[in-house]
Image (spheres, rainbow, N blue to C red):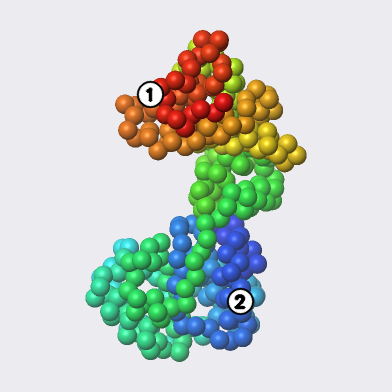
Amino acid sequence: MSYLVLARKWRPKRFSELVGQEHVVRALANALDTGRVHHAFLFTGTRGVGKTTIARIFAKSLNCERGTSAEPCGECETCQAIDAGRYIDLLEIDAASNTGVDNVRDLIESAQYMPSRGRYKVYLIDEVHMLSKPAFNALLKTLEEPPEHVKFLFATTDPEKLLVTVLSRCLQFNLKRLDEDQIAGQLAKILDAEQIAADPGAIRQIARAADGSLRDGLSLLDQALAYTGAAAGAGKLEDAGVAAMLGSVDRSRIGALLSALAAGDGALLLQEVATLAEFAPDWNSVLDALAEALHHVQVRQLVPGAGVDGAGVDIDAIAAATRPELVQLWYQMALNARRDLPYAPSARAGFEMAVLRMLAFRPGQVEGGTPPPAGASGAGKAT
Ligand SMILES: [Zn+2]
């Protein structure tokens, strides 16, 4: 049996299975149920948030053999063909590789003919902003007076590049990036259904790396399963394995770094940086992880009742050993260091300077051999 990638296996087949995008789903469902379906929709938003999936469900809703509604049956031949991506009246066109006017002419010509099987022909044109100007103009006429049996779904990551005349003829929807919780929730659900055990931290890391795209999250999950060998009833998707695959930082290293800082121990601090360097990390992500940990420390200090997931960092110890205003300062320094990293002699040097600066700004700790904050810019006087 061939392995079906998770993103395909778990592609939602009905509107109710979609993660996020409730505003789009509600508008489409209302239109379908009342029978007033606009002839052109424009979906804007980043990659992997559900454009093709929505288009397919929409095509099913329009063409399901049991009638047009927001709840296609999913069982008739039409529904099954669309789910399998082989339905003759759903035409998916990638404008990025079909930019010319000839491609559009072909499309417009075919749009004049009645659908082969269903009630509607649905055209999904992805990355529509890539069409050439003549191609747009050719399309415009059809958009003005489209045949009754044609629905256009346009998708773009860059709506600014579309002509106003095109925009004004479409109903526009902005597809939102998914947040970490939505992605983590879906990953957990799928792992559960596939009966694969996983650390919550491992899921969290993948959800974070997915950066708003559920499809990317599922691809990363596929990779992580291949990398760690975790499978149904065999092994477990663990924190460390996922961290190694993502090339992300082991959170306990961040904890050690912060402990050295809190203790004002410069030698230990540099040793920790050297240990990190052995893994050739992306120093930007290390700064990210550092800022994230500092955020958690601050929450623990100022809102003790709020739940904080330390993710491998001993938040309590660091919160007790540092003053809240210092944590604010360090956080700001971590962010500034990210901004300055491209200008540093090397990324590692930039990172090392950032943590040394944090060390320098530990006020009132001169006796430990830590340099006083003298000479640094005024922002640092946190005493
Ligand atoms: Zn059906």
Q: Residue at x 64, y 63 (%)?
A: 17
Mark 2 C-beta to ligand 1 under 8 Å: no
State which tag comes first along the sequence, 1 or 2: 2
Q: In this view, does 9 lie to the left or right of 154?
A: right
Which residue is at 58% across, 75% downward? 27
Quadrant in the rendering for residue 106: bottom left
Q: Where is residue 155 in the image (x, y as percent from the top left)?
A: 43, 68
Residue 120 point in image, percent of width and height:
49, 83
Q: Where is residue 280 in the image (x, y as percent from the top left)?
A: 43, 26
Q: Which residue is drawn at 62% across and 42% down?
A: 203
Mark seen at residue 380: none
Disc 2 element: helix
Q: Do the residues labelled 1 and 2 touch (CB within 8 Å)?
A: no
Q: Which of marks 1 and 2 is in front?
A: 1
Q: Is residue 344 left or right of residue 5?
A: left
* Crowding near the residue tagged with mark 1, few <14, some 14–19, many ≥20 C-alpha atoms within 10 Å: few
Q: Position of residue 62 (x, y in %)?
A: 55, 80
Respond yes or no on whether mark 1 lies under 8 Å from ligand 1.
Answer: no
Above or below, 45 relative to 286: below
Q: Is residue 376 visible?
A: yes
**Amino acid type of disc 2?**
Ala
Q: What residue type is labelled 1?
A: Ala
Q: In which quarter of the image is residue 58?
A: bottom right
* Left or right of residue 368, residue 197 in this image: right
State the residue position of label 1.
349
Give the alpha-carbon distance from disc 1 to disc 2, as whole Å.
55 Å
In this figure, which residue is indicated by the disc labeled 2? Answer: 29
Q: Quadrant of the C terminus?
A: top right
Relative horizontal placement of residue 46, taking residue 193 as reference (left or right): left
34 or 147: nearer the viewer: 34
- Asked which secondary structure carries label 1, the reply is helix
Q: Which of 235 and 172 is in front in this view?
A: 172
